[in-house]
Amino acid sequence: QVQLVESGGGLVQAGGSLRLSCAASGGAFSSYTMGWFRQAPGKEREFVVAIDRNGGSTYYGDSVEGRFAASRDNAKNTVYLQMNSLKPEDTAVYYCAAKILGGSRYDYWGQGTEVTVSS
């Protein structure tokens, strides 16, 4: 069973930066596509970014393109989300998720870390 634990959330002023981490255990991390999602209060879950198994390819949602950057360290079983130029509308609970090789959906999810951006 894969376990994902996010950290790094907090309160930041608009224009600031945060770096989220997601540590994985219990599985073959380097074989998973990893994703970040977010959910703001009263809104549906939103795709943020996906990063492939070796970190060579990333795909971003339109709302974060150019401001956020995903990376991963397979030696540490960790994926990161660097968030820059934060806006109040980035306020949400951020979740990391893992998709097994060949899968069509994300199979494992973390518990989330909360990010609040003040104006």
Image (cartoon, grey):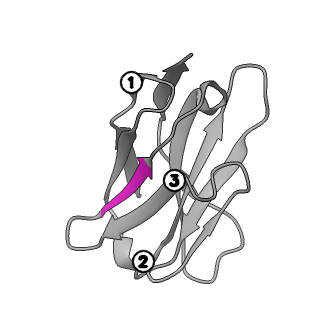
The residue shown at (53%, 38%) is 94
Q: In the rendered view, does 89 fall on the left or right side of 81?
A: right
* In the rendered image, the vertical position of residue 47 relative to residue 11, given as above or below: below
Cα distance between the residues tagged 1 and 2:
25 Å
Q: Residue furthest left?
A: 75
Asked whether residue 28 appears in the rendered view, the answer is no
Q: Amino acid at mark 3?
A: Phe
Residue 43 lies, in percent from the top left, at 78, 28
Is 80 within the magenta? yes
Query: Which of 9/97 is in front?
Result: 9
Pointers 1 and 3 in contact (C-beta within 8 Å): no
Q: Amino acid at mark 1?
A: Gly
- Which residue position is annotated with label 2? 55
Magenta segment's dominant SS is strand
The residue shown at (62%, 40%) is 38
Q: Amino acid at mark 2?
A: Gly
**Few, some or many C-alpha atoms within 10 Å of disc 2 (few <14, some 14-19, many ≥20)?**
some
Which is more N-terminal, label 3 or label 1?
A: 1
- Which residue position is annotated with label 3? 68
Query: Which of 87/70 is in front?
Result: 87
Q: Which residues are magenta?
A: 78-82
Is 59 within the magenta? no
Element marked by disc 1: strand
Query: Which of 45/32 is in front?
Result: 45
Element marked by disc 3: strand
The circle on residue 10 is 1
Q: Quadrant of residue 60?
A: bottom right
Q: Quadrant of the C terminus?
A: top right
